[in-house]
Amino acid sequence: MAENKKLVQAITSMEDDFAQWYTDVVLKAELIDYSSVKGCMVIKPAGYAIWENIQKELDKRFKETGVENVYMPMFIPKSLLQKEKDHVEGFAPEVAWVTRGGLEPLQEEMCVRPTSETLFCDFYAREIQSYRDLPKCYNQWCSVIRWEKTTRPFLRSREFLWQEGHTAHATAEEAEERTIQMLNLYADFCENVLAMPVVRGQKTEKEKFAGAEATYTIEALMHDGKALQSGTSHNFGDGFARAFEIQYSDKQNKLQYVHQTSWGMTTRLIGAIIMVHGDNNGLVLPPRIAPTQVVIVPVQQHKPGVLDKAMELKNVLSNFRVKVDDSDKSPGFKFSESEMRGIPVRVEIGPRDIAANQAVLVRRDTHEKMTVSLDNLSEEIASLLDTIQADMLERARAHRDAHTYTALTMEEFTKTVEEKPGFVKAMWCGCQECEDKIKEVTGATSRCMPFAQEKLADTCVCCGKPAVKMVYWGKAY
Amino acid sequence: MAENKKLVQAITSMEDDFAQWYTDVVLKAELIDYSSVKGCMVIKPAGYAIWENIQKELDKRFKETGVENVYMPMFIPKSLLQKEKDHVEGFAPEVAWVTRGGLEPLQEEMCVRPTSETLFCDFYAREIQSYRDLPKCYNQWCSVIRWEKTTRPFLRSREFLWQEGHTAHATAEEAEERTIQMLNLYADFCENVLAMPVVRGQKTEKEKFAGAEATYTIEALMHDGKALQSGTSHNFGDGFARAFEIQYSDKQNKLQYVHQTSWGMTTRLIGAIIMVHGDNNGLVLPPRIAPTQVVIVPVQQHKPGVLDKAMELKNVLSNFRVKVDDSDKSPGFKFSESEMRGIPVRVEIGPRDIAANQAVLVRRDTHEKMTVSLDNLSEEIASLLDTIQADMLERARAHRDAHTYTALTMEEFTKTVEEKPGFVKAMWCGCQECEDKIKEVTGATSRCMPFAQEKLADTCVCCGKPAVKMVYWGKAY
C-alpha cells in the first residue's frame, strides 16, 4: 500500500499544461510541500540541498570580490521604512506588520523585512565616518516576506530565501562599477553553474527597483517561452545616503554622501532550473548544482556480490556526490525515481555487468545509454558530467535563441507574442507611454534594455518617433 | 581624527566589572552593533564569521549522522501554536504577533516562530504514513523570535540565529537514542572545537522544555563562575504526535504514534566563547573556530622587501586562515587590534628578522613570544595552533574544576554561592519544593542532573529526606 502510493506516477506533459507540469515536478521530485501557512512553502531536503549548493557557489564568488557576511534584524520599525519616499511607496502595500510583542501592543509597529536597504542604511549611518571606512561590501543570507496575493512554489511566495548584498562607496563611479560587477557575477554563475543562459541589461524607469537610480537585471527564458527575472543589481546613487544622512569625511576633511548599491538572488532560481531544463520525466539537474550527481542502481541486488560491488563503486566515485539506491524497490521504480529527481548520471550494475567488468551509464538529459569498463569508470563519469553540463547550456541557449524574435511593427509584435512565446526584440523611443501601450496591446512587458544593443530600425515600434534603445520584451513570471 | 577614534582603547577589566568587560569586548572586537530595533542586534563581519564556522562544523557533524536540512515557514498560525497545551503555555507569553498582511488585517493572527515544533509536526502529519517513512531526521538553520524584556548581545536577544533539529522515530527507544546522540554531538563539538568543557546531564521537571518528556542539556562555566546552558536536546515521547495525530502503519499494518525529538544550538555560543576564553586584552578565539587563525604584521613595512616578505609568508601559510595587516596603522596598534580580535597566532616580521631568516610568533592565549626559522614556519604554526587549542581546553577545564564545589548542608550551600561563584554539587530528593526553596534561599537554580552521578551523601541537602539525584546548581545566564 505505502509502496504503491509512492510509485512514480506519470506527470502531466509540459505540452498539455505547462503550469500543471511545473507543479507536478515540484511535488513529485519532493522539492517542496505546501504548508498550513497560506502562501508559504516547506522546502524539503531535495529542494533545500539545491539551495545549499547555490549558496555555496555564490558565497565563494562573493567573498572572492571582498564581500563579507553580516546579519541584520528581521524587523523594520515603521519610521525607518518610511525614510526613503520611493522605497516605502514600493514596499508598504506588501509587507506583514507585527503589532504585538509578548502580551502587549508595540509602541511602534514593525514590518517583517521585505528587503533590508533601510536597516543597512541605518547601520551604515553609524558605522561610516571616514573615507577609511569605505567601501563597505556586506551581504546577508536570510528570508524575506512579501505579502503576495497569488503564489507559486519558488516563483512567487510570501516568504522566500535569498541573499541581499548592500555596499557603500566613496564615489558614484565605484558604486556603478560594483553594480555591474555583481550583475556579471550573477550572469556567469547562471551560465557556468546552472547551465542557464541569460540576457544582461538595464531595467526601464518603470520597471526599476523602488528607490534605485538604475536597476540592472539578468533575464532567462523558460521552456514555455516566458521570461524569468533571475537576479537584479541596483545602483542607488546617493538617494538613500541623503535620506539616512550617511556621510563620510574625505581626504580633504570635507563631508560627502556615500554612493550605494544592492543586489540579490533568491530561491526563485530553483524554479528557473526546473523550467529551463526539466522534461516530461521530471527534473533535470545540471551536474554542477545537483546534490546527487551519480546514482548507482544495483540490478538483481539480492544476488551475491551485487550490493558489495555497488558499494565498491561508490568508493571509487567518492570524488563525486554519489549515492547507492539499495532500497527494496524494483530497479524500474528506481530508474524512474532517479529521473524524476533529475540526477545527471545513473550507473546500472548487475551480475552480468560484473562478470563482464562493465557498467551501464545513463545520461539523464538525453536518456542515452553507454557501456563502460569498470577500469576507468571514474574518468568516464568525470568527462560525462562535463559533457552534460556543456550540452545543457548549449541546448538552453539554442532554445532561447530559437525563441527570440524581432518585431518592426506593432502588428508583427502582437502576432509574435500571440503565436510564438519567447523574447521579442523591438526598438523603443524611451517614453513610458509607449511602454504602457505595448503592454496593453501585446501583453508583453519590457524585460530589459540589453547591454548588447542592436539597431533593428531607426524608430520606435510603437509611436514611430526616433528610437533610443533596443528592448527585450516578453511575458514574464 | 578618524585614526584616533579607532585606536584600540583599554577595556574595562573583568575583575572590576565582568558585565561591562563583556559588553566592551563584544563592541571593541566588532562582533556586533546595537540596532534601531529594540532588543535585536546587528551581527558584524567578525561576529558572523564565527557563526559561519560554527555552522560549518556542526552541519558536517549533523549530516554524518544522517540529518538532512529543510526550511519551514517563519510564521505559525495561532491555531497551530495552540495544539499542544504545555507548549503553547510555555511560548505564548513571549512571541511576536503579525496581525496585518499588506493593507488588510489577517483572518488568523500568526506569530513569528519562537521554535518550530508545531510546524514540523504539521508537516510530519502529512509526510509520514508508513514505517518505511521513518525515521525522519530534519534540521533547519534560521532565526527565531522571543520577546525578551531584558536583552544582552548573543546571550539573550529578541531575535537570535540557531539550528533546530526535529526527528520522528518508530519507537520510544530510538527517539531516546537520538536525543542522547545529539547531546553528545553538541558536547564533543564544544570540547573539541570551542575548547569549552561542558557538564552533560538531564534537566529537572521544572526546568525542562515546554512539551518535552525529558530535556538534556550541556552546561558550561563562564569565567565569572556563572553557568551558561549551551545546547539542549529534548525527547518528546509521543506527546506531540498525539496532539498532531502523527501516525504510521507498522509492519503488521497497525497504526502507531511516532516518537519525536528536537535539539538546538544558538548564537549564544559566541557569548560562551567570549566568557570562557576572553581576557583583559579582549577576545581569545580557539584556533579551530577562529575566522583568522594567523595574522602577519609587517614591522617597518615601508622598508624595501618587508611587505613582499609578508605576502610571501602568507602564501607559505595558505593551509591556514591567514591575513596580512598591511594597513597604515602603527605596528603597536596592529598588535593590540589583533589581540582584541582574538587571533590565535601573530607573526611579526621586520627587516632584522628577514636578515636572520626568522620571524617572531606570539601566542594570543599566553602572550608567549618565540623566534622561529622561516624554513619551517608552516610546521611550527601547525603545531602551535594545536598546542593552543589543547591548552585552552585544559585551562578552561581546570577553571571549571576549581570552581565546582560540594555542599552537604544548606548553610554550606548558601555560603558557597555567596562567596565562591561556580557550580555547586548537592544531593536532592527530587521534589520541586526543595528545588524552589534552594533557589529562594541561595539564588542558584538547578543546572542539570549530570549523567556522571556521584553519591555525596544519602539525603537531600534541603529537606533531609532520601536523595535520588546529585544535581549541579549555579547562577546562570
Image (cartoon, coloured by chain):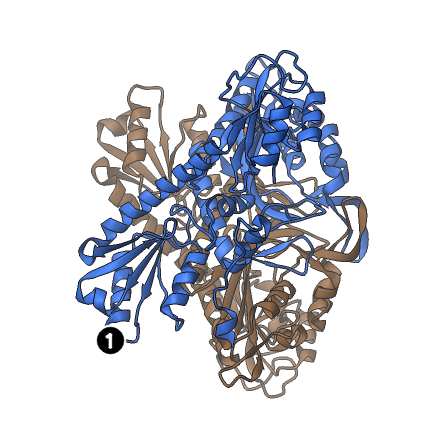
Chain colours: A brown, B blue
Q: Quadrant of the N terminus of chain A?
A: top right
Task: Give the tally of numbered discs.
Answer: 1
In-image side of B165 versus B59 (left or right):
right
Residue A424 visible? yes
Residue A223 seen anywhere in this rendered image of the structure: no
- Residue type indicated by callout 1: Pro
- Residue at 69 percent across and 59 percent down: it is A76
Q: In terms of secondary structure, where does tag 1 sit?
A: loop
Residue nearest the observer in this picture, A366 or A310: A310
Residue behind mark 1: B304
Residue A379 percent coordinates (x, y): 25, 45
Q: Residue at x 47, y 49 (%)?
A: B278
Return the residue nearer the eye: A135 or A283.
A135
Taking depth in this image into account, of A394 and A76 the one nearest to the observer is A76
Residue B50 screen position, x and y as percent: 47, 50
Coordinates of residue B361 in the picture (x, y in percent): 29, 56
**Is B329 or A223 nearer to us in this picture?**
B329
Quarter of the image with the C terminus of chain A is bottom right
Examine the rendered structure and indicate whether residue B265 appears above or below residue A150: above
